[in-house]
Amino acid sequence: MDLRVGAYYDQTPVKDDYLNPETPSMNKLGLTAGFSFRPVNNFSIDLSFGYVTGFGRDGSYTDRDLLESKPRVFGGHYNVHAYMPAIGLSYFFK
């Protein structure tokens, strides 16, 4: 059996002046874990799980309405959570 764990910190490259609602980039923390086992020769089962959470970010974005030429402001508090389970099956031919 093989065990794996990992973690990472992802610092946002997006400055406040470039924040927009389509890509609310923020600093994130990712945690991962997984294991592999071989119940029989030439066959492996891999299970893994990843979790990402953002530290939240307040921001706004000003856009122009193309029909009326009035500025529109989109803003709020952005946050993110992602859960990523995975399974892999491998068979090795000799």
Image: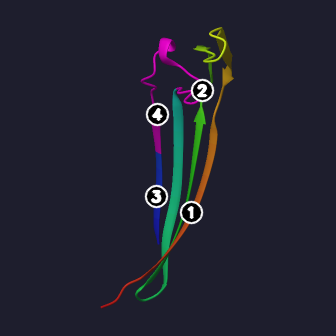
Secondary structure beneath label 1 = strand
What is the distance, in whole Å, between disc 2 and disc 4 at their CAs?
A: 11 Å
Q: Amino acid at mark 2?
A: Phe
Identify residue type, mark 3.
Answer: Arg
Where does label 2 land, which residue? Answer: 55
Residue 86's label in the rendered image is 1
Disc 4 marks which residue?
A: 9
Q: Position of residue 78 (x, y in %)?
A: 65, 25
Which of the two marks, 1 or 4, is nearer to us in this view? 1
Q: For mark 3, what is the residue?
A: 4
Q: How much space separates mark 2 and mark 3, taking CA atoms?
A: 25 Å
Q: Residues within 10 Å of mark 1 (few under 14, many from 20)?
A: few
Q: Identify the residue at horizontal 53%, vertical 35% (top origin).
A: 29
Q: Is residue 73 left or right of residue 89?
A: right
Disc 2 to disc 1, C-alpha distance:
24 Å
How far from the left and from the top, in percent, is residue 8?
A: 45, 39
| C-beta proximity under 8 Å, tags 2 and 1 | no
Q: Residue 84 at what x, y percent from top left?
A: 59, 53
Look at the numbered disc 2 and give the secondary structure of its residue: loop
From mark 1 to mark 4, how far is it between C-alphas?
A: 21 Å
Q: Residues within 10 Å of mark 3 (few under 14, many from 20)?
A: few
Please report the residue visible at 65 percent of the width from the left and 17 percent of the height from the top.
Answer: 67
For marks 1 and 3 on the same chain, the one whose residue lies earlier in the sequence? 3
